[in-house]
Amino acid sequence: MSQAPAFVFPGISRTASGLLRLGRKARALLRDGVRKWRVGIEAAPSVEGQSAGKPEAPVIERTIGQEVAEICFTDGRFPEQWPRHGECPACAGKDIVDAFAKAGFAHRRCRDCEFVFVDPFPPDDVAERLYAGEYYTNYREFHELPGLIRDGAATKFTAPDSALERVISRATGERKEGAWLDVGGGLGAFADLVKRRRSGWAVTLNELNPRSVEIAKAHFGVDNEPTSPAALFETGKRFDVISAISIVEHIPEPSQFVHAYARLLKPGGVLAICVPQFTALNRTVSRASSANVAPPFHVSFFDVHNFEIMLRRTQLFDRIEITQDGGPAFSLLHLVDSSTYWDITIPTRERPDPRSVMTKPYDLETAAVLNALGEAEQKIGDYFGDRDGRLYVTALAWIR
Ligand SMILES: [Zn+2]
């Protein structure tokens, strides 16, 4: 089974082991003088017709790349009808430059705060189709839900445990009870963790997907507030803590998101936001090779600096704490642009785990370089985590 080095998507690990394995195979092939290196290809949709007409052709599975192309490029009026940012969504700066592209989607960078964002970004109806699409639906039904039933509380979270535990302990403080809203809480695993750590607290979800809400209720007994933040505001309900774990990277207007949810906090309440981090080396070197770059799903790319700038600009908060968690956000493997070589299968009942698949083989030189980088990476340990930054950044912001 092949694995991509990097793609932060539900169920896809970011390890370099796949590449290391490919590298060794590549070396063996070099030794054997094999000209055409095709290892690692389990399913290769839309590639050079390599499986066409051959009786031994692998099963062709649908991939995220195919679904995205249909929804965005075939049906989605891309790019003419897609909204564009007139200014930086984080700092409102006007000095915007092109950064890089991935899978046909342009990423731009603010030269004032270094925030990176997808521009143009998906209009609401396209975003709705993407999130109600086959990948997210099948991932939930065939991968996430069976895992939940099988392993119960041992659910894999979308952010590091250290970040989640810190959010719970810092946001609740000494308080024995309170009201907590988890925005985009999916199947309710994080809400359940909060309930287990702080049994006196009432935790509700603010999740849009009806099937996720149903599962969260059945499995964790977690209720949902199904409305938009504006509609929720009108109900008069207010919360002591509002969390958004691995949500805001999907939001094209993060500052508006913060304003909309901050209004739902009680005086002294806490907004807790955790996002994957896009560091200085990610911006300058990794670019499309970063796992975090997953258009059109991920549209906002923060680092510790512009995350704080975005929050401070709102002038809503008394105190802001920013922390980092996880391994290094930068990998030496990013020196090679591997972004065009990989796609991810859409889970099915028969094959419930999404898998990274090669869409075309590395040439031997590229494979050899990746192999060398992979070996070097194993020796440098946490070097870049310390100096450049970690995979996740978390902000806790106390409202005035
Ligand atoms: Zn900016």
Image (cartoon, rainbow, N blue to C red):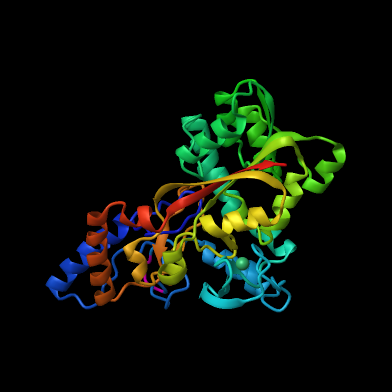
Magenta region, mostly helix, strand or loop? loop
Residue 320 in view of the camera: yes
Instruction: Give the magenta range.
Output: 53-57
User: Residue farthest to the left?
Assistant: 31
Q: Is residue 307 left or right of residue 345?
A: right
Q: Is residue 331 left or right of residue 302?
A: left
Q: In which quarter of the image is residue 242?
A: top right
Reply above or below: 132 against 37: above
Which residue is located at x 85 percent, y 36 percent? Answer: 236
Magenta includes 97?
Answer: no
Q: Where is residue 221 in the image (x, y as percent from the top left)?
A: 65, 27
Q: In which quarter of the image is residue 264?
A: top right
Which residue is located at x 53 percent, y 44 percent? Answer: 142
| Quarter occupied by the N terminus | bottom left
Which residue is located at x 64 percent, y 57 percent? Answer: 310
Nearer the observer, 209 or 385: 385
Nearer the observer, 120 or 3: 120
Reply above or below: 268 against 84: above
